[in-house]
Image (spheres, grey):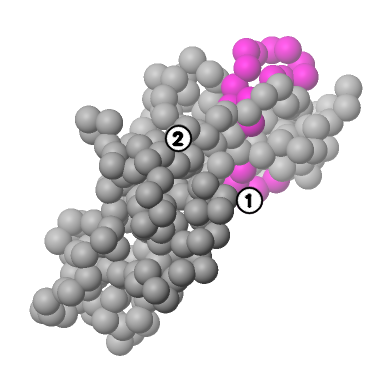
Amino acid sequence: MQSDTNITVGMIVEDWDKTSSCGVVVNYPPIPAEDWYVQGRGLLSEDNPDYPADDRTAIVIFEDDLEEHYPEYSGYEGIPMAQLNADDAPYYAFPESRLRRVGELKQPELALEAIDPSPYHARNFDAEANRDYIDAIAERGRPKPLPVVRPLADGEYEILNGHKRIWASHVVGLEEIPVAVLPLDNVRAAQYWAQRHLPGYNQRERAVALNRLHDQLNSMTVGEIRREHCSSDDSPQPIAAKTDGGQQ
């Protein structure tokens, strides 16, 4: 048996021990097998004595279960453990070297008209100021890196990360682009968005975004986001936002 060191989230894997069907790696928590506790069985390393105790812990959902719980998940980024637990998704922990890669999930191409901006996005983009950026996407024929979206109802999607890339794709005139689909609920989508946007916003943009977060979420969740991603000077203000999500 030879361990596979090229496994990442989104990989389709099988168990070297042949005790289960194929699954998909959906998360790599920063906890080694020797510290990962499996309910009712003890430490992951003790339950797998033939594998290194300091192996990375890989979280796997078997393919049938993935189709039932997260049919649009496309890999690229891991599903947060908090989301897996909130959804009561049936996942299993493996020492990484117990798994062998047999394939990988494909990134879908979506129509731009089916992708909406995040309701919290508070930045516009200027075509003249971003001409080189737009030209690079036009030359490649697709944005890079992949924008990340989440599935909504009725075949629509919401941007989690990559508003500028999707905006530039509109400007270029693309009709479809490849994306990474990450299934997140409203709270975890807001947390994901805030982590990747609020630190880079100026004070006015943060104020607009915080107002929008307050409109959508409870005060406790917004308070946690503010403490983690904003300075003490940032707070929701009764201002009239001039930004519109960057889709023009």
Three-letter residue code for mark 1:
Pro
Left or right: 131, with 101 as reference point: left
Task: Identify the residue position indicated by label 1 in the image.
Answer: 30
Tag 1 near tag 2, CB within 8 Å: no
Residue position for label 2: 109
Which mark, residue 224?
none
| Front one among 227 and 35 | 227
In the picture, the quarter occupied by the C terminus is: bottom left
Tally the numbered discs: 2
In the rendered image, the vertical position of residue 165 relative to residue 28, given as above or below? below
- In the image as oriented, which residue stretches furthest toward the bottom? 233
194 shown above or below 129: above
Q: Could you tell me which residue is drawn at 36 percent across and 57 percent down?
A: 171
Give the residue displayed 64% in from the left and 13% down from the top: 20
> Most extreme residue toward the right, as rendered?
1
* Secondary element type, mark 1: loop
Q: Is residue 20 magenta?
A: yes
Label 2 element class: strand
Region of the chain picked out in magenta, as a range: 11-33
Q: What percent of the width, then of the height, locates residue 8?
A: 66, 39
Task: Please tell me which of labels 1 and 2 falls first in the chain.
Answer: 1
Q: Is residue 178 left or right of residue 240?
A: right
Locate residue 60 relative to residue 113 in the image: left or right.
right
Q: Position of residue 133 (x, y in %)?
A: 50, 65
The correct choice, above or below, for 28 with respect to 207 in the image is: above
Instruction: Report which quarter residue 124 is drawn in.
Output: bottom left
Q: CA distance from mark 1 to mark 2?
A: 31 Å
